[in-house]
Amino acid sequence: MRSVLGLVIVLAACHNDGLRFPVERTPQRLARGRYLVEGLAHCFQCHGEVDPLHEGQPRAGTKGAGTPSFPDAALAWMAVPNITPDPETGAGRWTDEQLANAIRNGIGHDGRRLIALMPYPAFRAFSDEDLASIIVYVRPIPPVRRKQPKPVIPKEFEFLRIALPRVTSVPAPRFATPEERGEWLARIGDCEGCHTPVGPSFEPLPNMQLAGGQYFTGPYGTVTTPNLTRDATGIPYYDERVFIRTIRTGRVNGVRPLSSVMPWSYLRNLTDDDLRALYAWLRTRNAVRHYASNTEPVALCRVCRMRHGGGALN
């Protein structure tokens, strides 16, 4: 599940005039946009009808077209909009500025505040150039005529409409170390959104960063997110080589498959340098003792107060 944290973005100060609309289409932006959309941001995992038998990629003919019902059972009330360039049912009549405002500030083309399952709290970290590149890549995808309903948000989920200060310009970040770059990658990819236990209002539990235990049910089956920390209950046996191989192949130790709810089929498109940086950042995180397993029965966990696989072992 996408994180609903209001993220504080600390970037190096430099002169920046902000985005100019419409954004200029260049081959460099098209290539960068493809890398982000089909990789780190995994946009089509939500904006498409996911095929769990095809590594979580969109079903044929649905790429960008959204879905009338979010694939997670707890959020099935949420429709995801069509962002293909179809002018009647998609984003064909949205301006580049409207698209940028939705991605970065969570404001829809019609002025309504989006719920933070659209990960604008994380996407606020995109630089102006990266945001422009995403727009350049998404605009020419094949149009799909498929009208999706506007989400009718249950009252108990209204808190997901997060009002954050409007961002108009973000300079390119500067990274002094691979760990700093890995932190940025993890933020955009929203690793914590699935791998950190949350409370009743989806707030991350303190001192439980990346300790796993979120429980999902959908067309991909039932899944408990694993502990990614260095504790013995996590993945202390992962070295850099094992980590990269797992993301590239979608299999742990070449055997156990990762669930398609984990966007590994997008993350595998990252460069080796980016995956190394992500791994380097993971190894700086505190070890947290917390069993979270897909091979143990689902039970109430005394540590995170959630029900998940392996919960009774805590």
Image: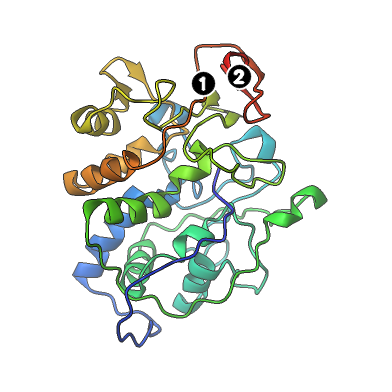
At label 2, which amino acid type do we have?
A: Gly
Tag 1 secondary structure: loop
Nearest the viewer among 206 and 280 is 206
Tag 2 secondary structure: helix
User: Compared with residue 27, is residue 50 higher up or lower down, i.e. above or below?
Assistant: above
Other residues around mark 1 within 10 Å, as few (<14) / some (14–19) / many (≥20): many
Other residues around mark 2 within 10 Å, as few (<14) / some (14–19) / many (≥20): many
Question: Which numbered circle lies on residue 291?
Answer: 1
Labels 2 & 1 near each other (Cβ < 8 A):
yes
Residue at 65 percent across and 62 percent down: it is: 162
At label 1, which amino acid type do we have?
A: Tyr
Hey, which residue is sitting farthest top in the picture? 296
Nearest the viewer among 91 and 10 is 10
* Residue 112 percent coordinates (x, y): 68, 69
Q: Quadrant of residue 249?
A: top left
* Residue 263 percent coordinates (x, y): 40, 38
Question: Which numbered circle lies on residue 197?
Answer: none
User: Compared with residue 220, is residue 145 higher up or lower down, i.e. above or below?
Assistant: below
Give the quarter of the figure containing the C terminus.
top right
Question: Which numbered circle lies on residue 311?
Answer: 2
Give the quarter of the figure containing the N terminus.
top right
* Residue 302 percent coordinates (x, y): 66, 23
